[in-house]
Image (cartoon, rainbow, N blue to C red):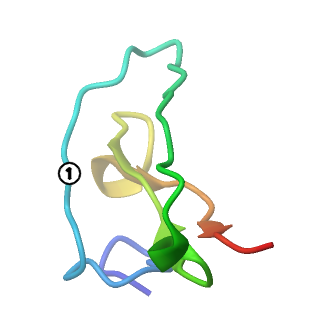
Amino acid sequence: MTSTGDTLLVSPIALFVPFPVAPYGASLYGDVPLDIDLLGVTFDLQAIEFDPGAAYGLSFTDGLELFFGL
């Protein structure tokens, strides 16, 4: 639980990448390289948004887990 009352599901130490998103949403696209070293790797993601309608001005998305496997 954070001081804003939200739940932080991932470690903020791992990677922090701020970028703007339009108020009506966005789609993010990217390629995952075909790399045997990624087999079995798990990435956990969560977004924190500036939200003037939320308590303390922040809202948190649900967590997303990406697992690279067969």
Image-based side of 67 in relation to 30, left or right = right
The number of numbered discs placed on residues in the rendered structure image is 1
The residue shown at (50%, 73%) is 38
Residue at 49 percent across and 37 percent down: it is 31
Query: Where does the image place residue 18, in percent across and percent down from the top left?
Result: 19, 44
Give me the residue at 34% from left, 34% from top.
52
- Residue 21 screen position, x and y as percent: 35, 23
Q: Which residue has dot 1 on it?
A: 17
Q: Measured along the vertical axis of the image, is residue 55 above or below residue 6?
A: above
Is 10 displayed left or right of 20 in the figure?
right
Q: Is residue 6 visible?
A: no
Q: Nearer the viewer, residue 26 or 39?
A: 39
Q: Is residue 23 above or below residue 49?
A: above
| Helix, strand or loop status at disc 1 | loop
Query: On the rendered image, what quadrant is the C terminus found in?
Result: bottom right
The amino acid marked with disc number 1 is: Val
Residue 5 visible in the current orientation: yes
Residue 26, x across and y down, in percent = 50, 19
Q: Nearer the viewer, residue 27 or 31?
A: 31
Observer-nearest residue: 2 or 46?
46
Question: Where, by quadrant of the figure, is residue 23 drawn?
Answer: top left
Q: Quadrant of the N terminus?
A: bottom left
CA neighbours of label 1 inside 10 A, class few (<14), some (14 to 19), many (20+): few
Is residue 8 placed above or below 23 in the rendered structure? below
Residue at x 47%, y 50% (from the top left corner)? 33
Q: Is residue 17 left or right of residue 9?
A: left
